[in-house]
Image (spheres, rainbow, N blue to C red):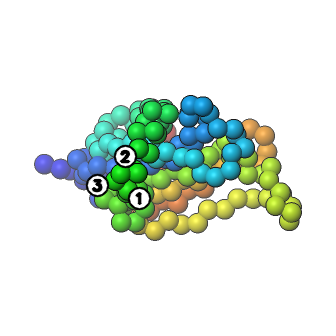
Amino acid sequence: MAINHGTSGLNREEMTQCKIAADMRRRLDPPLKKECFGNVTGLAVATTNVGELLDHGIGWTALQISKTVRSQTNKSYKTFAENWVTNVKIPKIGAGSRLAAHSLIVASSPWFELYDHDFSWGKPIATSAGPVNGVGGLLVMFLGAEEGRIDVHATLASSLWSDVLINIFAE
């Protein structure tokens, strides 16, 4: 029997995902230069159930996400590209995907030097990220304006993530 945990409304057997766009520039063989223009990303998807998250905690969860990102290699990206050419599918990472309401999407990267770019109207002084519809949560990360800092913008569906936030801040 499934037991609901707190106010999240999720039972232990329900599946949840963390989706991350992994930068593939340095993972390709030969690697692309850092300055390569355009998006060269692979979609890393870590999937588990709510019970595993609750039982193992945030450290275990971070390790599973890290393993998923590290699994994005030249070989896996090449296989994806070859398969995609013959069976075109646009990945659904937001509204409309099967697990969208139970997903956390991580976008951008603290490696992207946002504050170093000047598009002739001056360098940025702040970052901003808007809401994402139909997804449980969105984290957007940028290298901070000050050295050693990371700006994190979080948009979380309160009904889905209220217990998660309470547990994180209680630790």
Q: Is residue 110 above or below residue 64?
A: below
How dense is the environment of label 2, judged by Cα within 10 Å: few (below 14), some, or many (20 and up)?
A: few
Per the model, the C-alpha gap separating discs 2 and 1 is: 12 Å
Q: Which residue is mark 2?
A: 83
Q: Position of residue 110 (x, y in %)?
A: 65, 44
Look at mark 1 in the image and give the residue it sits on. 90
Q: Is residue 21 visible?
A: yes
For this rendering, which residue is in front, 75 or 113?
75
First along the sequence among labels 3 and 2? 3
Type of amino acid at the residue the image marks with label 1: Ile
Per the image, label 2 sits on a secondary structure element best described as helix
State if disc 2 and disc 3 touch (CB < 8 Å). no
Mark 2: which amino acid? Asn
Residue at (64, 52) in percent of width and height: 38
Q: Nearer the viewer, mark 2 or mark 1?
A: 2
Q: Secondary structure at mark 3?
A: loop
The quadrant holding residue 95 is bottom left
Disc 1: CA contacts within 10 A as few (<14), some (14-19) or many (>=20): few
Whole-percent x and y of residue 147? 78, 40
57 or 135, nearer to the observer: 135
Task: Check residue 10 in the rendering and tell me which mark sits there, or answer none.
Answer: 3
Q: CA distance from mark 3 to mark 2?
A: 34 Å
User: What amino acid is at disc 3?
Assistant: Leu
Q: Is residue 30 above or below residue 45?
A: above
In the orientation shown, which residue stands out farthest toward the left?
Answer: 1
Residue positioned 60% across, 31% down in the render: 30
Mark earlier in primary sequence (3, 1):
3
